[in-house]
Amino acid sequence: MTINWFKYASPASFYFLAGRMIPYFSVATIIFLIAGLYIAFFSAPTDFQQGEAYRIIFIHVPAAWMSMFLYVIMAFWAGVGLAFNTRLSSMVASAIAPTGAMFAFLALWTGAWWGKPMWGTWWVWDARLTSELILFFLYIGFMSLQAAIDDPRRADKAGAVIALVGVVNVPIIYFSVQWWNTLHQGASVSLVQSPKMATAMLSGMLIMSLAAWMYAIVMVLIRSRLIILERERHTAWVSELKEGVLE
């Protein structure tokens, strides 16, 4: 049996698909979150240099990763919407932005809590910290610009321009510790090198990252459905949904 995935490019079809997917990803979020937090606070050993304070990385690192990954995904869908004038692509990009901004803020906030005992200060104008702050402002700028324009199609196009231009900041964040002499420590996980942390620490961080991914998917699906209902409110299928004809 062949599934025609292109039919889900329709906002109406995607609305119902998203509704069926949300419960599964919600359960996965809870499972990964409980497992990750248990490893982070009960199984992972104490770091011999940073003590117990290092445990904030189990939230900080997944949040930082997600803030970058979600921005790239947001820019991709915004670019698809701009290039091919596809409504759903732009809606998904708009749905991603708040969650991406939340993760960027969480990365900055937890980084500050880690920096105080390690560096003796809440904030330094370090290359990685500053570029992550710029990423947060890019998310805010994307959402603010879209909110300031009444016409959704014009708002989508304007937001796509900001999103695509801002992509250049993502590799700057990632490679900042290699390109400049920064206070921020280098990557503990690399695709080309062996992990620089204990197995329990690494597994806990990766499981928390999966929890963050599942959570992001749930929130994007929920917001996508809300945006679809708002923009398609004058269509026949939404009217039937309100009347209980569709489920």
Image (cartoon, rainbow, N blue to C red):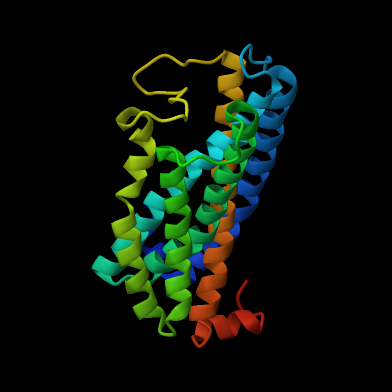
Q: Tell which of 92 and 146 is nearer to you.
A: 146
* Figure quadrant of the C terminus: bottom right
Q: Relative to 31, is 214 on the left or the right?
A: left
Q: Relative to 83, is 77 on the left or the right?
A: right
Image position of 96 with respect to 191: above or below: below
Q: Position of residue 129 (x, y in %)?
A: 47, 41
Q: Position of residue 196 (x, y in %)?
A: 48, 15
At x 51% / y 86%, what residue is drawn? 236
Residue lying at the far front of the rendered structure: 120
Q: Position of residue 87 (x, y in %)?
A: 37, 72
Q: Relative to 207, is 137 on the left or the right?
A: left
Q: Position of residue 163 (x, y in %)?
A: 35, 60
At x 36% / y 45%, what residue is drawn? 170
Give the quarter of the image for residue 29. top right
Image position of 30 with respect to 51: above or below: below
Q: Tell which of 78 and 14 is nearer to you.
A: 78
Give the quarter of the image for residue 40. top right
What is the number of callouts on the image? 0
Give the quarter of the image for residue 130. top left
At x 60% / y 36%, what residue is drawn? 121
Image position of 121 with respect to 1: above or below: above
Q: Tell which of 231 and 243 is nearer to you.
A: 231
Work out whether residue 234 can be spotted.
yes
Work out whether residue 4 can be spotted.
no
Image position of 63 with respect to 230: above or below: above
At x 62% / y 33%, what residue is drawn? 114
Q: Tell which of 15 and 222 is nearer to you.
A: 222
Residue lying at the far right of the rendered structure: 42
